[in-house]
Structures are given as structure tokens and as C-alpha cells.
């Protein structure tokens, strides 16, 4: 039992480390989040360091980054200086945090710049200017569409229409069914 649990935990942590780059964090940060998700109780930096064989500095940086993404909450242990980290375990909130942070860091600045540059090209009658403007307008259209979808998702519009909670509940039921066989 313990061997299986530890093997699964190690595999899960490795998977989260590899997935980190998908949502814009380092593998170490992904591993810390994955490891925290496998723990029954909040963990302090020393436990994370020992559990993942990471340096104190790497653990500290990963925990700060996870806090910035709203994927981990830090709580000071009463009567001491020790800080324990609690991972966000609600899938919908975690995905919303990831989308919100990616939107703020990536899509918003891209749209802002595209919307500055396109008008600046209106008086450029050269072939190069026309091609550049056409391509920037196309990029702006796609990024604006994705941005609007992200806004709707963050406001709950898409989630309510698509029934994400129902989909997650259904996936959990199916997952339990597979584990039982």
C-alpha cells in the first residue's frame, strides 16, 4: 500500500512538473504544487524541501510564484514563525487562477500593443506596411477572441453554459468507477 502510494505520488509530482510549462511556470514550481496536492495536510517549506529534495531557495521561489498564481495560500502557524502552504484543491478555482494570470501577463499586453500599432500603420501606403497591418489585424482578431472567451470563462458565463461543474462531477464519477474495477 505505502509503496503504491509513494510511487503514485512521485509519478504525479513528475507529471505536474512537466505540465508546469503548459501554464507558464517552471518545472520546480509545478512539482511543488503537485507535491502539495498529494499531501493530506498543509506543509511548511522544510517539509517541501525534504519531500522533493530541493534547495530552500528553490522552494521559496516556487511557493512565492504559486501564491502569485493564487494556487497556494501561506498561513503562519500560530505562536511561531513557521509558514505552512495550503494548495488550491478546487479544480474550477485553480483553472480560473491559471487563466486569469495568463491573461494578465500575456494576452492583455499583446492586445494593448497591437491596438497601439495598428492605427499607427493607417497612413503607410507601402506594400510592406499593408502586409504588416493586415497580419497585425488578423493576430489582433484571434487574440481578442481568445481574450473574450477568457473573460467569459472568468465571469462564469462559459462555465455556466457549458456546465463545467457538471462535467467535473461526471469525470469524478467515471474516475471512481475505473478505480473500483
Image (cartoon, rainbow, N blue to C red):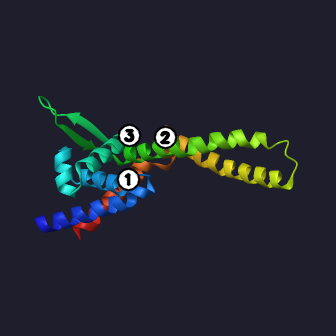
Give the structural element (helix, strand or loop) at label 3: helix
Q: Position of residue 145 (x, y in %)?
A: 63, 48
Point out the frontmost of discs 1 and 2: 2
* N-terminal label among 3 and 1: 3
Residue at 24% from the left image edge and 50% from the top image edge: 36
Give the quadrant of residue 30.
bottom left
* N-terminal label among 3 and 2: 3
Query: Which mark is on residue 168?
Result: 1
Question: For mark 3, what is the residue?
Answer: 68
Furthest toward the right, the residue is: 125
Q: Position of residue 165 (x, y in %)?
A: 40, 48
Determine whether, in the image, residue 117 is placed left or right of residue 91.
Answer: right
The CA distance from mark 1 to mark 2 is: 17 Å
Which residue is nearer to you in this view: 126 or 134?
Answer: 126
Give the structural element (helix, strand or loop) at label 1: helix
Determine whether, in the image, residue 57 is placed left or right of residue 157.
Answer: left
Point out the frontmost of discs 3 and 1: 3
Query: Which mark is on residue 154?
Result: 2
Amino acid at each position: 500500500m505505502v509503496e503504491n502510494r509513494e510511487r503514485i505520488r512521485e509519478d504525479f509530482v513528475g507529471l505536474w512538473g512537466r505540465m508546469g510549462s503548459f501554464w507558464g511556470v517552471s518545472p520546480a514550481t509545478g512539482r511543488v504544487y503537485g507535491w502539495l496536492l498529494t499531501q493530506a495536510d498543509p506543509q511548511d517549506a522544510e517539509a517541501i524541501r525534504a519531500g522533493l529534495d530541493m534547495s530552500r531557495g528553490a522552494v521559496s521561489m516556487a511557493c512565492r510564484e504559486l501564491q502569485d498564481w493564487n494556487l497556494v495560500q501561506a498561513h503562519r502557524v500560530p505562536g511561531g514563525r513557521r509558514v505552512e502552504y495550503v494548495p488550491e484543491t478546487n479544480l474550477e478555482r485553480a483553472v480560473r487562477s491559471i487563466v486569469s494570470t495568463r491573461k494578465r501577463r500575456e494576452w492583455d499586453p499583446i492586445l494593448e500593443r497591437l491596438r497601439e500599432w495598428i492605427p499607427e500603420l493607417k497612413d503607410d501606403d507601402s506594400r510592406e506596411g499593408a502586409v504588416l497591418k493586415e497580419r497585425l489585424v488578423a493576430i489582433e482578431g484571434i487574440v481578442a477572441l481568445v481574450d473574450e472567451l477568457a473573460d467569459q470563462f472568468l465571469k462564469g458565463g462559459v462555465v455556466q453554459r457549458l456546465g463545467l461543474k457538471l462535467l467535473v462531477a461526471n469525470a469524478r464519477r467515471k474516475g471512481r468507477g475505473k478505480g473500483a474495477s
